[in-house]
Amino acid sequence: MSTSPPDWLNAHGDATPVIDPESHVREYAERRGRDPNENCPALVIGGFINLMVDPIADAVGAAESDVRLGLQGPKTINRAAEEAGMVRPGLRIGELDGHPIGVARIPVGSARSVMTLEELMALGARTFLIAGATGALKPGIQVGDYVIATSGLREEGASHHYQPPDYPARANGPAAQALIEAAQSSTHASHAGRVWSTDAPYREFTGKVQRYGQDGVLGVDMEASALMIVTEFRGADLGLILTVSDLVYRRDWPNIFGTDEYRANCADMAGIVVRAARALLTGPSAAS
């Protein structure tokens, strides 16, 4: 099966980006009357939904900061809405074992998640630990298990603007290894390996699910391969852990979205992310 998109890397003579992340975040800060040199810690942890992000933020005592991401949230700051808890800045700042640490909610979908990581990296982030969810593609992986994504099958669009179609998506560095080791202390089973990322969840064909599962692909999500490509492209390190929320390999599609079980699994996964962050901060190759 061919998965090659058009030649989106053809710059037609001039490969200079019209907008680069660093100048954009600086301009956005100046427009808001903030310090254009504002930044974030080298290590950023977070997830795609509040059920994942809030326990992480609580564990490191993260407080809302003035750092906002220009392509996330409203362009005009509504202070009353912020005070009421209706709007969150793009970045919260906490502390773990005496080290500053960033906490971010990453938007769902490859395009917006890539833009957010681009801006965080422009602000100084070099290592990411991100929590998400996946649908299992293989029997033997159950709801509530964890998948640490170490490589990706690229069927989302964003990554193809960074690397050609045959370039491997991978996240197998220190951040991923820290998650693998931290997950061992959980009562939930964990699996490390390849995931399939697609922009079209309502076009996950039964035959394709069966084929990819047979090929050893563990789960499906919407962001993993794009985040792998963009972080490697920018010289950063990514660790991505996904809780299994549903069983795509079964025709009856068992899932636990919106349940207490799902909330508990997200909270447990948050603990894994924090343990992995501690290991990275205190280990021999600690982020600084």
Image (cartoon, helix red, strand yellow):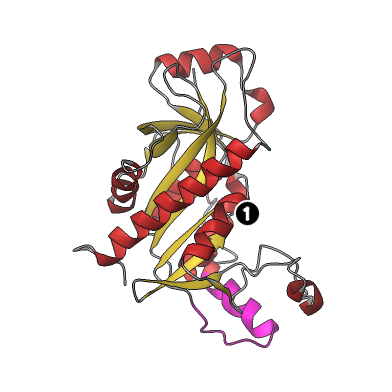
Which residue is painted at 59% across and 36% down in the image?
A: 261
Q: Between 131 and 40, which is closer to the camera in this rendering?
A: 131
Q: For the C terminus, which image quadrant?
A: bottom left
User: Which residue is found at the position 55% from the left and 43% from the top?
Assistant: 264
**Relative to the observer, which residue lies in front, 280 or 167?**
280
Q: Is residue 17 left or right of residue 34?
A: left
For residue 38: magenta?
yes
Q: Residue at x 61, y 50 (%)?
A: 51
Residue to which mark 1 is pinned: 50
Residue at horizontal 60 percent and vertical 43 percent from the top: 263
The amino acid marked with disc number 1 is Asn
What is the x, y in percent for residue 121? 46, 65
- Spot the residue most to the left: 284
* Residue 105: x %, y % from top left: 58, 58
Residue 8 visible from this viewpoint: no
Tell me: 124 left or right of 192.
right
x and y, in percent, of residue 18 in the image: 60, 65
- Left or right, 189 with respect to 286, comes to right
| Magenta stretch in the rendered image | 22-39
Q: Is residue 55 visible?
A: yes
Residue 222 placement (x, y as % from top left): 57, 38
Mark 1 neighbour density, 10 Å: few (under 14) some (14–19) many (20 or more): some
User: How many marks are shown on the rendered structure?
Assistant: 1
Q: Give 38 or 278, whichever is nearer the viewer.
A: 278
Q: Measured along the vertical axis of the image, is residue 279 above or below residue 37?
A: above
Occupied quadrant, residue 258: top right
